[in-house]
Image (cartoon, rainbow, N blue to C red):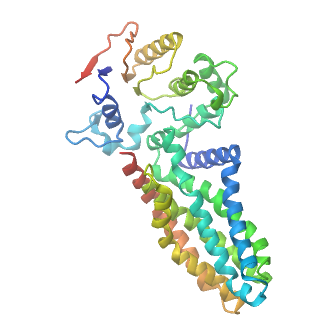
Amino acid sequence: MNKLSLIGLFGLVVRRDLLLAMRRRADVLTTLIFFVMVVSLFPLGVGPEMDMLRKMASGVVWVAALLASMLSLPRMFSADHADGTLEQMMLAPQSLSVLVLGKIVAHWMLSGLPLALIAPVLGLQFDMPPQALWILVLALLLGTPVLSMIGAVGAALTLGLRGGGVLVSLLVLPLCIPVLIFGAGAVEAVTSGMSVVSNLSFLGAFMLFALVFTPFVAAQALRISME
Amino acid sequence: MQVQGANGSGKTSLLRTLCGFIRPDEGEIRWRGKRVGDLGEDYHAELLYLGHLNAIKDELNALENLQMSAGMAGYQVTEQQAIAALRRMGLQRREHLPVRVLSQGQRRRVALARLLTSAAHLWILDEPLTALDVGAVGLMQELIGEHLSNGGMTIFTTHQPLQVAGVETRQLTLI
């Protein structure tokens, strides 16, 4: 019998969550369709004034991405909690933080990554210039992992509570404001001809900071929820 | 060791405390002379816990479930080993069916198949016989007997009498 290493276990959790999502595609698609719908409503509602649309584009896309990622958060741990898998994860002979990180990465690949990839298509509705579209994708790629990571802490804290879905949004949304400001700021900077380096650096820093702390915090929160 | 007691007498709480999910109000849990809180993951490597919940996924088939739960416990199981374990649990030709379509007893058998692939020293089983038929109860007695004769330990709760051949089961009755 081969023992699994830390990285082997991490890979297993990611693969497992992706496999489960493939068997239950509706969950993944709802997030993506919600994002597309919300962003598409704005050009229809505001009307065809190009100047106005161009100005609000990055903010609208970021707010929609934030809301879409909230949509899938309550599901992050609840299914594993309900069928007892979470108990088994806590008894794994490796650190629980690594398993939680695996779940976060899988969550991002299913919610954040698709949003970042489809964003340029939506940006065209707002008449965004090509270089702004590139920066939008880059900023989303840096920012959405932070949303998944902070969201994991919120999801772990509200596990098993009634009405946890709304509560997790209330807990997590305020913490995501910095990501929103710098993410939308990066795109605005490029459209007004300024340097985007500072905004993107901030997003990168948030991501690294969250990467270090959130898996550990979420694992502790899970332990408390299980007692 | 068999833990007995009426409903609500604290059997499950005791087992969950032994696993480390619940911190005891008083006293401490020791494994090989060391506190389990200090041992952490080393203790988990020697422990196999099976609770009321089966910890299997409806969307996956029996084979995938077994391989995933073995992986979660930190070791890899080849397809042959997993199929052999499922066969022994009486799940021939059910290996590739989604667990969703299996009966309650068959799901329990999928969960119990973990016992066959695990190298854990201490088994903690909470009501392992729920939903099992007579044949499977006999099989469980056999499995526990094998585990004990290999030097393993088992703590289980049950309301049914469970005789393990050649070993005297210690009884703990909670009131």
In front of the other: A128 or B153: A128
Residue shown at the point (79%, 77%) measured from the top left: A125
Asked if residue A153 lies left or right of residue B4, the reply is: right
Q: In the figure, B89 relative to A170: above or below?
A: above
Residue A143 visible, this angle: yes
Q: Quadrant of residue B47?
A: top left
Asked if residue A134 lies left or right of residue B69, the reply is: right
Asked if residue A68 lies left or right of residue B51, the reply is: right
Q: Position of residue A113 (x, y in %)?
A: 68, 63
Q: In the figure, B102 relative to B29: above or below?
A: above
Quarter the C terminus of chain A occupies = top left
Q: Position of residue B119 (x, y in %)?
A: 48, 28
Q: Residue furthest bottom?
A: A193
In front of the other: A99 or A132: A132
Q: Position of residue B34 (x, y in %)?
A: 28, 38
Residue shown at the point (64%, 47%) measured from the top left: A15
Q: In the figure, A71 relative to B52: above or below?
A: below
Residue shown at the point (64%, 60%) measured from the top left: A111
Asked if residue A225 lies left or right of residue A129, the reply is: left
